Image (tube, grey):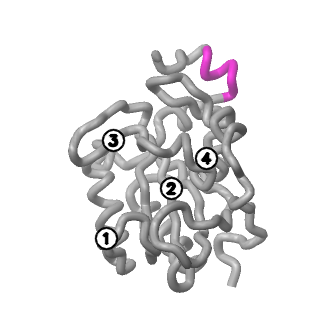
Amino acid sequence: MAPLTRQESAARGVGESESRAALIALGANLGDRLDTLSNAARDVARLGTVLARSALYETEPVGGPAGQPRYLNAVLRLAPAPEWGDPLKLLDALLEIELRYGRTRRIRNEARTLDLDLLDVQGVVRDDVRLTLPHPRMMQRAFVLAPLLDVAPTWRHPETGAWASDALARLDVRGVTRSAMGWDAR
């Protein structure tokens, strides 16, 4: 499916900044989740300009070992600085931020101090050993789509044309709750 034209974007309320942005999911379920996400969002902001940040969402763990604590999830819409415009460079910068917060990768979908997922970068479609864009499972994850719609309400999958809002409407959202917490509530 072809990306929206400028006229289509304007008619649907999609601004230039939304169509040229990177969408980054943040999640944590170990430690002080709010502090981690707030600080990680500031670190991500050093990679460009944060155009929007979603509300915070409390979510049930999906997959992985049983007995994990609930997650705190969010999505940022970032206009990457020129040096981070390449999706692989942006991915590497996000992985470095995860490491600074103690992220380990031993068991798939295990509890984590910080998870940063690159969901979309300017509608680029990519599928290789290091990076798949858009994120391959995002359209099946209510904990990603709910906050994504806060920052990019008209987002469509660049290959299929599927609207994120339609995908969310088909999912079970019982484990996803918009939190009353603010980003810097302390």
- As measured in the structure, the alpha-carbon distance from the residue carrying label 4 to the one carrying label 3 is 17 Å
Q: Amino acid at mark 3?
A: Thr
Magenta region: 8-13
Provide the residue designation for mark 4.
145
Residue 18 screen position, x and y as percent: 55, 37
- As measured in the structure, the alpha-carbon distance from the residue carrying label 2 to the one carrying label 1 is 17 Å
9 in magenta: yes
2 vs 3, front mark: 3
Q: Residue at x 55, y 18 (%)?
A: 6
Q: Is residue 10 above or below residue 84?
A: above
Which residue ends up furthest to the right in the rendered image?
A: 180
Number of the label disc, if any, that sits on residue 25: 2
Mark closer to the chain start, 4 or 3: 3
Q: Residue at x 51, y 45 (%)?
A: 138
Number of the label disc, if any, that sits on residue 1: none
Crowding around mark 1 (Cα neighbors within 10 Å: few <14, some 14 to 19, many 20+) is few
Mark closer to the chain start, 4 or 1: 1
Number of the label disc, if any, that sits on residue 132: 3
63 in magenta: no
- As measured in the structure, the alpha-carbon distance from the residue carrying label 2 to the one carrying label 3 is 14 Å
4 vs 1, front mark: 1
The secondary element bearing badge 2 is classed as strand
Residue 91 screen position, x and y as percent: 31, 53
Mark closer to the chain start, 2 or 1: 2
The secondary element bearing badge 4 is classed as helix
